[in-house]
Image: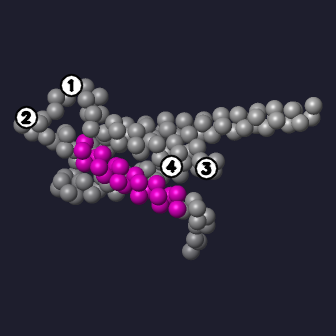
């Protein structure tokens, strides 16, 4: 049996992101399900798919910040690692919600994952772009500093 060799700091980032996403996805999915299943006067008016975004928009942004921070901070962080952690956290939260609601309706818990996935993808790309731009700015700054010393 082969044991995967993962550095301790990376393992801490994995576990931290997973725990953070469990909390954000859990609250976000719970609010989304409460919104969709509301009855009576509290029932939402849903005319377009964008009307379903109201209860989860803030949670999408919050979860996206974590992906942007990790992509900007760690040059070895990949979108594949981020996707695996995100899917694992969503699967756990989805299963808990399905058991809690006594339902097998996968669409109820799968549909709200799309905006979370889209926001994470955009944030991950933005984090990598920011790291790239900061690295280029640092290279230009160090180049200009070395030219001033030569004169």
Asked if the residues shown at circle 1 and circle 3 are in contact, with their CB atoms under 8 angstroms apart, the answer is: no
**Residue most extreme to the top:** 47
Label 1 secondary element: loop
Query: Where is residue 83 shown, x and y percent of the image?
Result: 48, 48
Label 2 secondary element: helix
**Residue under circle 2?**
41
Q: Which residues are magenta?
A: 12-32
Please tell me in which quadrant of the rendered image residue 55 appears: top left
Q: Residue at x 31, y 52 (%)?
A: 26
Q: Residues within 10 Å of mark 2 (few under 14, many from 20)?
A: few
Q: Residue at x 54, y 62 (%)?
A: 11
Label 3 secondary element: loop
**Residue under circle 3?**
74
**Residue under circle 4?**
82
Image quarter of the N terminus: bottom right
Image quarter of the C terminus: top right
For the stretch drawn in magenta, the main secondary structure is helix
Q: Residues within 10 Å of mark 1 (few under 14, many from 20)?
A: few
Q: Residues within 10 Å of mark 4 (few under 14, many from 20)?
A: many
Whether residue 12 is situated above or below residue 94 in the rendered picture: below
Q: Residue at x 56, y 45 (%)?
A: 71
């Amino acid at each position: 049996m082969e044991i995967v060799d993962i550095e301790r700091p990376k393992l801490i980032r994995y576990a931290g992101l997973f725990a953070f996403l469990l909390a954000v996805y859990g609250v976000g999915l719970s609010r989304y399900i409460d919104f969709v299943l509301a009855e009576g006067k509290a029932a939402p008016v849903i005319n377009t798919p964008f009307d379903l975004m109201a209860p989860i928009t803030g949670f999408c942004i919050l979860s996206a910040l974590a992906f942007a921070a990790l992509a900007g901070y760690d040059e070895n962080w990949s979108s594949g690692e981020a996707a695996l952690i995100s899917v694992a956290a969503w699967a756990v939260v989805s299963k808990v919600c399905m058991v809690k609601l006594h339902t097998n309706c996968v669409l109820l818990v799968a549909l709200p994952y799309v905006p979370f996935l889209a926001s994470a993808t955009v944030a991950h790309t933005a984090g990598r772009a920011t790291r790239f731009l900061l690295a280029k700015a640092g290279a230009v700054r160090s180049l200009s500093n070395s030219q001033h010393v030569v004169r």
